[in-house]
Image (spheres, helix red, strand yellow):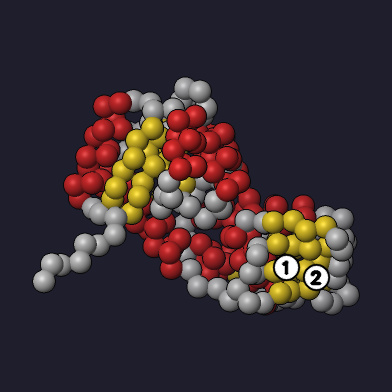
Amino acid sequence: MEPVAMKKDKVLLVEDDYFFSKTVKCFLERVDRFEVHLAADGQSAWELFKQEQFDICLLDVVMPKMDGFSLSVLIREVNQDVPIIFISSRYLESDRIMGFKQGGDDYLVKPFSFEELRLRMNIFLKRSKGQQFDISTTYKFRDYTLDMKWFTITQGEHIETIFPKEARLLQLLAENKNRLISREDILVTVWGAADFFSGRSLDVYISRLRKRFSKDKHVLIEAKRNKGYILQIVDGI
């Protein structure tokens, strides 16, 4: 009886340095169960992404035709959950922060260890495949309704689709309304680990949620310095 072949994780590697990309591809396919697809610029990568279903994306930042940040924004418009790791020679803190704001999950600065890249990839793949949330519930915030099945927030006749992680974060806050939730508990529950990169992502999503409820002074997400967050509904849910 033939052994059943294990499904390989499909990787989109976007890198304009041919020899570097080929080296990364050979390493990943040799040491782990990856199927790596290469693209040399952002535009060709976007065309490839629209045709294939990838499990994870590795994006260079500075590339011809379309940079990695712009590509990440396009990817997030159609897929909010696929892990995105930026691999770049740009090391400034502002570049890292921009990467997270544009939808990235991690940011590696060249040169880096290929083994570290592989381990980080496996961490994000486990997170993206292993999160378990109740999707049958809706939550009411005064005039707002969060629908966990469709990842939407409805206010009157206005319906807005939000990122799944944003919805899951709001769901966790709602289930613990008027109670302090520590940053660590939020990160472990929603992101799977309380590390630096997940913390940056949490800050971005908290900012997004505050903007969504900014017109209603009765819906507040308060931060307790170095402790965590509290969702407060002044007149109740």
Q: CA distance from mark 1 to mark 2?
A: 8 Å
Q: Nearer the viewer, residue 188 or 128?
A: 128
Q: Where, quadrant-wise, is the C terminus in this rendering? A: bottom right
Q: Quadrant of residue 190?
A: bottom right
Q: Quadrant of residue 26?
A: top left
Amino acid, disc 1 = Leu
Residue pictured at 47% horizontal, 57% vertical: 195
Whether residues under marks 1 and 2 lie with C-beta atoms below 8 angstroms apart, the answer is yes
Crowd band around label 2 with a 10 angstrom C-alpha radius: few (<14), some (14–19), many (20+): many
Residue plotted at (47% across, 46% down):
84
Decide: is 152 above or below 200.
Answer: below
SS type, badge 1 = strand
For residue 146, the mark is 1
Does residue 237 appear to the left or right of 152 in the view shown?
right
Quarter of the picture containing the N terminus is bottom left
Q: Nearer the viewer, residue 222 or 87?
A: 87
* Residue pointed to by mark 2: 141
